[in-house]
Image (spheres, rainbow, N blue to C red):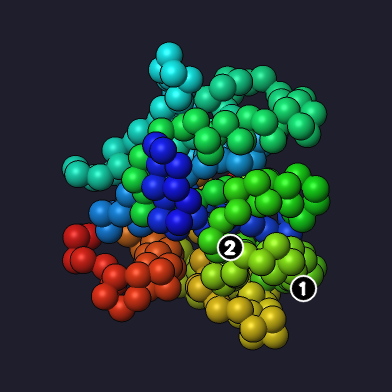
Amino acid sequence: MTETKENRIKHSIMVMSGKGGVGKTTVAVNLGLGLALYGKEVGILDADITGPNVPKMLNIEDATLTGDEDQTIHPVELPVGSDSGIKVVSMAFVIGKDSPVVWRGPLKMQALKQFIETVTWGDLDYMLVDLPPGTSDEPLSIAQLLRPDGTIIVTTPQDLALLDARKAIDMSRALGIPVLGIVENMSGFTCPKCGGTIDLFKVGGGMKAAEELKVPFLGKIEIDPAICETGDSGMPFILNVQSKNAEAFDGIVRKIMAHYEGERGEPEPSRE
Ligand SMILES: Nc1ncnc2c1ncn2[C@@H]1O[C@H](COP(=O)(O)OP(=O)(O)O)[C@@H](O)[C@H]1O
Ligand SMILES: [Mg+2]
């Protein structure tokens, strides 16, 4: 629980990976929306300051943060279904989508500190933090600053990516943040024409790593052109597509809720 005068955040989870391009933002956004579909109050903090992609994936790139005289900042709110929504804060709202961010480390940390301390998140069940890629100083400092309750590690299935995933797990453990588990993304491909599966980057490595490193395996998401298309167009996958990969995201969402809320926290049947 993170509590300030303005905010009560029950569970904050950082989504991290050993390297970029493995689908961290995709996973953070779809899990956040998936939790909102169960009526949870969700915030997404885009802590990837140099490559803030969350607004693009949600088609809210042109939004700007508003504030009050008392220096509070309001998150951008995005409706999800008829009676819930998510709150988003990203550096992209501050700098505009086309300007490259060339800030030095201390300034970035200052901005993030404000995102936590002066943003009126309100009462949240879950905050998902999309971290910058890798295990270098920057994600490490951000993790130290935010002190989340749990980490989700995103990896692709092949061996090299798994080495990176191991580093991410080590970093989380070194910081004393429990690892909720591994998501294996880009795990095989089902041919839409013949229905056969092709293991483009091999498959099952995430599961193997989870066993070896004694962390839970949360689920696997295939390479799916619809995930890429919906990411590019800002029409989030989990809200717009019904398929086995959408079910796979839903399965991970349920595991997160079961972890934090126990069996009784299991989803109310509010999803269609
Ligand atoms: N399972 C998937 N199938 C197809 N494309 C994917 C999948 N996961 C991610 N992508 C695409 O791969 C690219 C990188 O994903 P992204 O989430 O931005 O990675 P990261 O945040 O780790 O850098 C994006 O264009 C995204 O739409
Ligand atoms: Mg990203």
Amino acid at dot 2: Thr
Whether residue 240 is visible, yes or no, is no
Q: Quadrant of residue 74?
A: top left
Sequence-earlier tag: 2 or 1: 2
Residue at x 55% of width, y 49% of height: 129
Residue 35 at what x, y percent from top left?
Answer: 35, 57
Amino acid at dot 1: Asp
Residue at x 66% of width, y 52% of height: 143
Q: Secondary structure at mark 1?
A: helix
Q: Quadrant of residue 138?
A: top right
Can you identify the residue that label 1 sits on? 159
Between marks 2 and 1 in the image, the one whose residue lies nearer the viewer: 2
Q: Residues within 10 Å of mark 1 (few under 14, many from 20)?
A: some
Whether residue 145 is visible, yes or no, is yes
Quarter of the figure with the N terminus: bottom left
Residue 50 at what x, y percent from top left?
Answer: 69, 34
Quarter of the figure with the C terminus: bottom left
Q: Are marks 2 and 1 in contact (CB under 8 Å)?
A: no
Can you identify the residue that label 2 sits on? 151
Residue at x 69% of width, y 69% of height: 173
Spatial distance from mark 2 to mark 1, Cα to Cα?
21 Å
